[in-house]
Image (tube, rainbow, N blue to C red):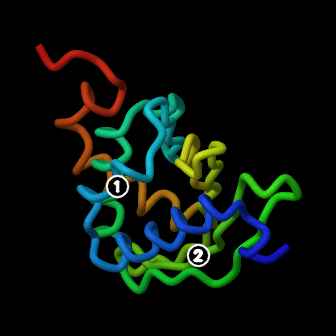
Amino acid sequence: MQIEQLSPAAQETLAAWHHILERNAMEELDPLLADAIVFRSPVAHRPYPGREAIKLVLKNVNMVFQDFTYHRSFVSEDGHSVVLEFAANVNGKQLKGIDMLRFDAQGKIVEFEVMVRPLSGLQALGEEMAKRMAPHAAVLYGESAS
C-alpha cells in the first residue's frame, strides 16, 4: 500500500516527522504526538509513556545512528498505521529496522514501536542508548522526578 492510503491527517504528520528527523528537532514533535503516546524500544522491556520520553529517546537515537536512511514504507489496510524500514550504523555495526507508527483519527501518533536486527547491531544500539538514557529513568517511565 502507498503512503497516499494513509488518512490525510496521518500523511501530514508523517511528512512533518521526516522533516523533524532530518533536522533532529525532536523538540518540535509535540503537535504530532497524542497525549497518551507510547514508545516501545527494541532494547527495553517496558514501554515508555508520554511525550517527554519519546522526544528524549528519539533525540538521542538520532545522534547514535550513523548513515540513517529510510528505504521502504508499508501502510495498513485501515490507513491508520505505517511501517518505515530503515538502515543505519552504530559504532561500526550495521543494522536494519522498522519504525511502526499508529495514528489516531486526528493524525497524531499514538504508538511508536521500533524493531532492530541483527543482534550485533541491536547490542551496539542498546549499549550506546543505555549510556545516554541511564540518568533519565524517571522521564522514560513517566515517574515523578522528585
Q: Name the residue located 85 percent from the left edge and 73 percent from the top edge.
A: 1
- The earlier-in-sequence mark between 1 and 2 is 1
Q: Residues within 10 Å of mark 2 (few under 14, many from 20)?
A: some
Alpha carbon distance from label 1 to label 2: 20 Å
- Secondary structure of the residue carrying tag 2 is strand
Q: Is residue 52 above or below residue 144?
A: below
- The residue lying toward the viewer, choosing from 90 and 68, is 68
- Residue 13 as seen in the image, left or right of residue 64: right
- Left or right, residue 140 beside residue 86: left
Residue 145 pos. (x, y %): 15, 20
Badge 2 is on which residue?
A: 86
- Dot 1 falls on a residue whose secondary structure is loop
Say which residue appears at 51% left-offset and 45% top-offset: 41
Q: Measured from the top left, where is residue 66 in percent x and y?
A: 36, 80
Q: Nearer the viewer, mark 1 or mark 2?
A: 1
Q: Identify the mark at residue 29; answer none if there is no mark.
A: 1
Dividing the picture into quarters, in which one does residue 137 lie? top left
Where is residue 71? Give x, y as percent. Answer: 64, 84
Q: Position of residue 63 (x, y in %)?
A: 27, 69
In this rendering, the answer to whether 118 lies above or below 111 is below
Query: In the image, what residue occupies the spot 46% across and 76% down?
Result: 93
Which residue is pictured at 37% across the width and 51% down the height? 31
Name the one closer to the observer, 15 or 49: 15
Q: Amino acid at mark 1?
A: Leu
The mark total stands at 2
- Determine whether 105 is above or below 100 in the image: above
Looking at the image, residue 111 lies above or below residue 75 = above
- In the image, farthest residue toward the right: 77
Amino acid tagged 2: Phe
